[in-house]
Image: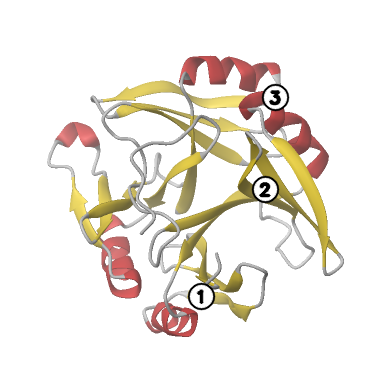
């Protein structure tokens, strides 16, 4: 099992769901991915909780930040200093949407918007180190920037996180891996014309699953809008859907050599 007790700076370490209906989301993901939710029993937590699989946290869940905002999966990148990262964001032409904020003794978070329009979060760990299980069925396995401005992203993320872009051609499409310390930590691709014109640049979250067909069928049965039933990729077959509350995510059945 891919167990984690911490993350190096610059590595995506956590994801959470901001939902317009937390109870409905808890039910949906419990049925589709088998997660168990534990909500924080403290009014100051704002209705936040965590999803668990076999006793290990795999993702978070809570209400949207403000009324009228859509449901969305958020990507968090590990940092040793959220305030210093916020300074680099502004120097690189990004926007600090939510300044660094301490969350009890768990850690410090901040939310930024890059010049390409995509939002990304950072996490400075305290007691909460990030996802305890990754790269296994029903856990986080990849984070991918889908952007309308590749050039802006290639300037912004190296300045903020120290990432190095490594583009490669895949079936006539340029796919970029983001490297941190020489290791591949995330991906990037230009948004295709198939996306509705109002869709902004965004970070897509991928969860590994044991059986792609069963997972997509369960999501559809429970009210999800399936965008991709199954598509081949080097890491494995993947699908994409929008959950009943409107948050998009991808699921992938990783090949055995991953």
In space, the residues marked 2 and 3 are separated at their CA atoms by 19 Å
| SS at mark 2 in the image | loop
Tell me what residue is drawn at x 59 percent, y 72 percent. 236
User: Which scheme is used to colour this image of the protein?
Assistant: secondary structure
The answer to which of 41 and 139 lies nearer the viewer is 139
Q: Position of residue 144 (x, y in %)?
A: 62, 52
Query: Would you name the residue on which mark 3 appears?
Result: 159
Tell me what residue is drawn at x 12 percent, y 42 percent. 41
Residue 4 can be seen, yes or no: yes
Q: Position of residue 14 (x, y in %)?
A: 42, 44
Q: Is residue 137 left or right of residue 85?
A: left
Within 10 Å of disc 1 (Cα), the crowding (few <14, some 14-19, many 20+) is some
Residue 225 shows which numbered tag? 1
Say if 45 sits above or below 227 in the image.
above
The answer to which of 116 and 178 lies nearer the viewer is 178
In space, the residues marked 1 and 2 are separated at their CA atoms by 20 Å
Tell me what residue is drawn at x 25 percent, y 53 percent. 56
User: If the image is split into quadrants, where does the N terminus sit?
Assistant: bottom left
Q: Is residue 17 left or right of residue 194?
A: left
Query: Would you name the residue on which mark 2 appears?
Result: 201
């Amino acid at each position: 099992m891919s167990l984690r007790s911490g993350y190096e700076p610059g590595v995506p370490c956590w994801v959470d769901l901001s939902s317009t209906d937390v109870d409905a989301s808890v039910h949906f993901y419990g049925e589709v991915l088998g997660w168990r939710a534990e909500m924080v029993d403290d009014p100051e937590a704002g209705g936040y909780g965590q999803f668990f699989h076999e006793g290990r946290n795999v993702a978070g869940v809570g209400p949207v930040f403000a009324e009228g905002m859509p449901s969305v999966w958020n990507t968090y990148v590990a940092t040793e200093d959220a305030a210093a990262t916020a300074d680099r964001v502004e120097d690189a032409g990004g926007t600090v949407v939510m300044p660094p904020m301490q969350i009890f003794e768990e850690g410090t978070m901040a939310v930024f918007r890059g010049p390409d329009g995509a939002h990304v979060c950072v996490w400075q760990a305290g007691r909460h180190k990030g996802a305890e299980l990754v790269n296994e069925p029903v856990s986080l396995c990849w984070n991918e920037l889908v952007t309308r401005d590749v050039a802006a992203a290639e300037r912004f993320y190296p300045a903020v996180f120290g990432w190095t872009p490594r583009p490669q051609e895949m079936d006539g499409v340029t796919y970029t891996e983001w490297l941190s310390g020489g290791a591949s930590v995330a991906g990037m691709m230009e948004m295709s014309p198939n996306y509705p014109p109002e869709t902004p640049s965004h970070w897509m979250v991928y969860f590994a699953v044991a059986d792609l067909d069963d997972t997509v069928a369960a999501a559809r049965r429970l009210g999800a809008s399936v965008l991709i039933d199954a598509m081949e990729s080097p890491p494995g077959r993947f699908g994409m859907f929008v959950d009943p509350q409107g948050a998009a995510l991808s699921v992938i059945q990783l090949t055995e050599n991953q």
